[in-house]
Image (spheres, grey):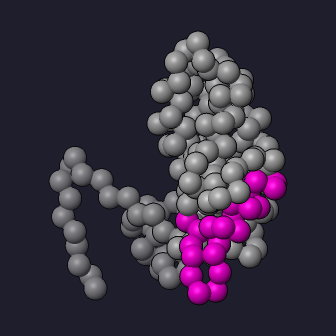
């Protein structure tokens, strides 16, 4: 449309796009677009950087193995047979998991911070980051399916009544 958006020197514009399928070379060069393929980079650099920045040594020592144990298993578990409200990229789910951890880990008193406590908080966060977007519609109850599969895959025990999201 050849419209120009005036920006002051202190303003920056960031474009977050799914693909460059419809972008012209002129658009890419003028906007200075850098496309990073999620498959090439993956979620690990984000997690490694975040874990290194944690001040608590117990967290730094225990969180990497939890990410290794849960993320790929959750990706495999939800690859087929699930329906989300909207398509959410893996990096966004991992970011949500990190945000939940950042919100809950500081609430644990220093003397109570143990590997078991960290795993409980991690499990809760992973459950919501990956299961939260699941929907209930006429084709099925994907939240219930996630709750059952999550308990089976990770050996997490929830009461029979309700879903994992209720606890």
Q: Position of residue 72 (x, y in %)?
A: 77, 53
Is 147 inside the magenta-drawn segment?
Answer: yes
For image coordinates 63% across by 75% down, the residue present is 141
Examine the rendering and report whether any part of residue 94 can be seen.
no
For residue 133, say whether it is visible: yes
Left or right: where does residue 25 sit relative to residue 48?
A: left
The residue under the point 27% across, 82% down is 2
Residue extending farthest top: 111
Q: Position of residue 136 (x, y in %)?
A: 57, 76
Choose top left, top right, bottom left or bottom right for residue 20. bottom right
Measured from the top left, where is residue 71 in percent x and y?
72, 50
| Along the line of sight, the residue nearer the viewer: 83 or 23 | 83
Residue at figure coordinates x 50%, y 43% from the top left: 99
Q: Is residue 164 above or below residue 80?
A: above
The magenta region covers: 133-153
Q: Quadrant of residue 117?
A: top right
Vertical arrangement, residue 67 with respect to residue 105, above or below: below
Q: Residue furthest front?
A: 161
Q: Is residue 34 magenta?
A: no
At 56% across and 60% down in the image, what residue appears?
132
Q: In the image, is 86 to the left or to the right of 66?
A: left
């Amino acid at each position: 449309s050849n419209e120009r958006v005036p920006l002051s020197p202190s303003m920056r514009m960031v474009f977050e796009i799914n693909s460059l399928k419809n972008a012209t070379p002129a658009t890419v060069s003028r906007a200075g677009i850098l496309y990073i393929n999620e498959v090439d980079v993956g979620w690990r650099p984000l997690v490694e950087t975040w874990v290194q920045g944690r001040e608590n040594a117990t967290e730094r020592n225990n969180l990497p193995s939890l990410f290794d144990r849960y993320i790929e298993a959750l990706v495999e578990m939800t690859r087929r047979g699930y329906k989300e409200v909207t398509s959410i990229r893996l990096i966004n789910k991992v970011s949500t998991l990190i945000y939940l951890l950042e919100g809950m880990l500081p609430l644990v008193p220093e003397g109570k911070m143990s590997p078991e406590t960290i795993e409980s908080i991690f499990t809760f966060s992973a459950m919501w980051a990956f299961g939260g977007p699941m929907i209930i519609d006429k084709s099925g109850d994907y939240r219930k399916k996630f709750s059952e599969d999550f308990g089976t895959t990770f050996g997490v025990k929830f009461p029979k009544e309700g879903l994992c999201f209720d606890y």
